[in-house]
Image (spheres, rainbow, N blue to C red):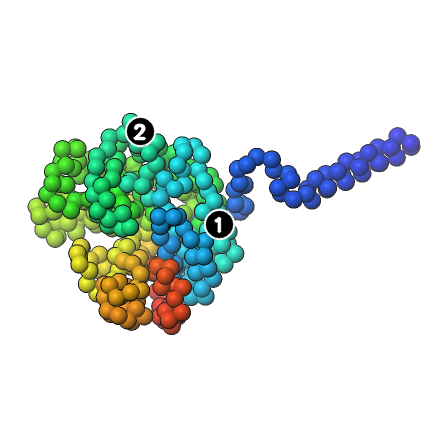
Amino acid sequence: MRLSRLWCVLLSVSLLSCLSWTSLPARAQRQDSAAPAPQRREAVRCASSDDATPNGLAVVLPPTEKGHAPGNLEALNNPFVSGVSIQINWRDIEPVQGKPDWSTLDALFAAAISSQKWVQLDIYPGFFSPEWALAGAKTDMFLVPYGPHHDTLAKLPMPWDPVYLDRWFAFLKRLSERYGNSPVFRMIGAAGPTSVSDEMTLPSYSPSAVKKWLSDGYTPAKFLGAWEKTFHVYADTFPNQCVSLAAPGLPILDRGKSGRSARLRAKQDIVERAFKVFGRRLVVQSNDLHAGQAKIETFDGTDFIKSYCGRIITGFEMRGGSRGAGPSEVMGAAGNPPLALRKSVDKGMAANSSGRHINFLEIYVGDVLAPDMQPVLRYAASLFGKSKP
């Protein structure tokens, strides 16, 4: 009897010790300097239902010279916004091999969970790869064709180089291990055989650039082979996410040597290749939606993207913000940013010949935060009642 009582006492003390340990702050329990991964929950497979499909307005958070402004996360509290698309450079996450800094993405996921917004990740390798990832890889120097670093001469890895791609794929695995089970992580942009963004484009701004690509060994088959491998890596690495293919197509060599119909068939072929890998989880989008006229106009992919509405997930990202005289002119109404944004929204949200609409529309953070844009955002959000997947 005494032994039983003694055993009960010892058991009670042990239980109290365990309870006191679990009640300690997380900082006291964890001694290592690495931040803990976001809380894991069972993720819902993207596109498994209408509710699990990227839909509605999303705010775009672009990269800047100083990273991402924390105040931009306030845009996730906008009642007309359903999702967030963050653009971030690989070199800003993993400047040292194997030691990624997840702080920016951790803050994003925390804000998205708090505000109940879905997340799209657009992480840029190519020109914005860390220097260590290019060691031993074949590279060449090209002018950055667009974006904040426009016309800057920078080092670009060959899109098909196995050394570079294998390091990129290893990073993607670490990314998935950290965020792949987050219930808000809905979509990721496919990248790797890319240059300045996640678009399937390469700098081909002049005959000399095309000549350089030819001397570097570019062929359509080599480029497509790199993308085929990339499709399979993304499908396996991100089983819960939809995968977005931006501006699908073959760069450079077909320019001037094949007609519009041949280039269109090439774009359709790439989408079909991707669909065989991803199925319902494939997304096709254009990142150049605008209702005005830019100084340099490229292929307008609006009708091409809309041709897939109702068959696969589709969406548009605005070409840029609408604030200021120049941007508002490009977006559709010089000197009138709200009207410019409204015109671009109308262009993107118009139904295709089958009466179907895109699934999502991405608007830059400056326009989402601006007070005079709120009526336009309200209007745009209301249109998605008619745009079922």
Res. 55 image quadrant: bottom left
Give the position of the C terminus as an image quadrant: bottom left
Could you tell me residue 206's position as x and y percent? 12, 45
> In the visual, does 338 lie left or right of 294?
right
Residue 52 visible in the shown view = no
Q: Nearer the viewer, residue 53 or 162?
A: 162
Give the position of the N terminus as an image quadrant: top right
Assess disc 1: are there few (<14), some (14-19) or many (≥20) residues with their C-alpha within 10 Å of its C-alpha.
few
Q: Which mark is residue 135?
A: 2
Res. 53 image quadrant: bottom left
For mark 1, what is the residue? Answer: 107
Q: Seen from this angle, which residue lies furthest left?
A: 257
> In the visual, does 312 lie left or right of 16?
left
> In the visual, does 211 lie left or right of 184?
left
- Name the residue type under label 1: Ala
Name the residue rendered at 30%, 32% in the picture: 134
Q: Give the structural element (helix, strand or loop) at label 1.
A: helix
